[in-house]
Image: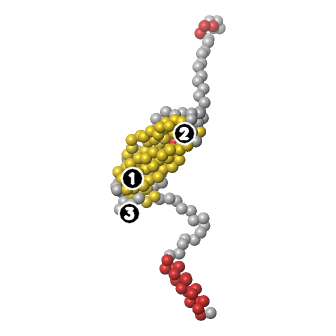
Amino acid sequence: MINVDETNDLVYVGITIEKLTTNLVVDAIKVTESDGSATIKVTVGYPQGEQSELDADVALMVYRASDFEDGNPPIDQLTTKTITGILRGDSRPVSFTWAVKNGDFIFVAVLDPDDNVKEVNEDDNSYPSLMTTFGASGPTVTEKEEDDGLLPAPSLITALSLIGVVALLRRRS
């Protein structure tokens, strides 16, 4: 049996095409400590986009270093701040303050957490800091160092001993 009723054979589809050219990025995070509180400065960049300026929300999550590595939730989320009128091609800082606790921590800046700005690349909107250790000696930022195949530097005693031996040998000859 063939369907001859043409009124139920039509399909209407609406397509919306959105041109994505905007990109916001977290350029850097800097952590400093003073009088029992940490100041976390997050630098946000607006390298490309259609608009000459736009507003960007920035959230900051605080993780214990071990929780961050294990994929556990943050121990603290600081109040979201808004950078207003960031110009295309420019970058602007925003600062957060956090009451210091002893231990190893990683701060993760999340740009546009509510996804209000449609972007070309959403993957660069989250940026973790290096591990920062707070304690009696003050903050210590742990960085990976590469020695490029060089030997470690000699201790002060070893260096002075070598200089003394060379001076002694030169004197005898």
Q: Which residue is mark 1?
A: 38
Label 1 neighbourhood size at 10 Å, few (<14), some (14-19), many (20+)? some
- Depth check, mark 1 against mark 2: the one in front is 2
Would residue 156 appear left or right of 104 to someone viewing this image?
right
Please state which amino acid type lies under the numbered disc 1. Answer: Ala
- From this view, report whether residue 119 is shown above or below residue 132: above
Q: Quadrant of residue 17?
A: top right
Q: Which residue is mark 3?
A: 137
Nearest the eye: 83 or 20:
83
Residue 70 seen: no
- Gap between marks 3 and 1 measured at Cα: 14 Å
Q: Residue at x 53, y 75 (%)?
A: 154
Residue 151 is situated, as x and y percent measured from the top left of the image, at 57, 71
In x, y percent, where is residue 27? 53, 47
Residue lying at 58% horizontally and 24% vertically, measured from the top left: 16
Q: Secondary structure at mark 3?
A: loop
First in sequence: mark 3 or mark 1? 1
Q: Secondary structure at mark 1?
A: strand
The answer to whether residue 12 is above or below residue 170 is above
Could you classify mark 3 by the number of other residues whose Cα lies within 10 Å: few (under 14), some (14-19), or many (20 or more)?
Answer: few
* Quadrant into which the N terminus falls: top right
- Image spot of residue 72 (x, y percent): 42, 46
Mark 3: amino acid: Ser
* Residue matched to label 2: 87
* Residue type (three-letter) at the residue carrying disc 2: Leu
Q: Position of residue 34 (x, y in %)?
A: 37, 56
How far apart are the alpha carbons under marks 1 and 2?
28 Å
Of the 4 image quadrants, the one containing the C terminus is bottom right
Looking at marks 1 and 2 on the same chain, the residue that comes earlier in the sequence is marked by 1
Identify the mark nearer the N-term, 3 or 2.
2
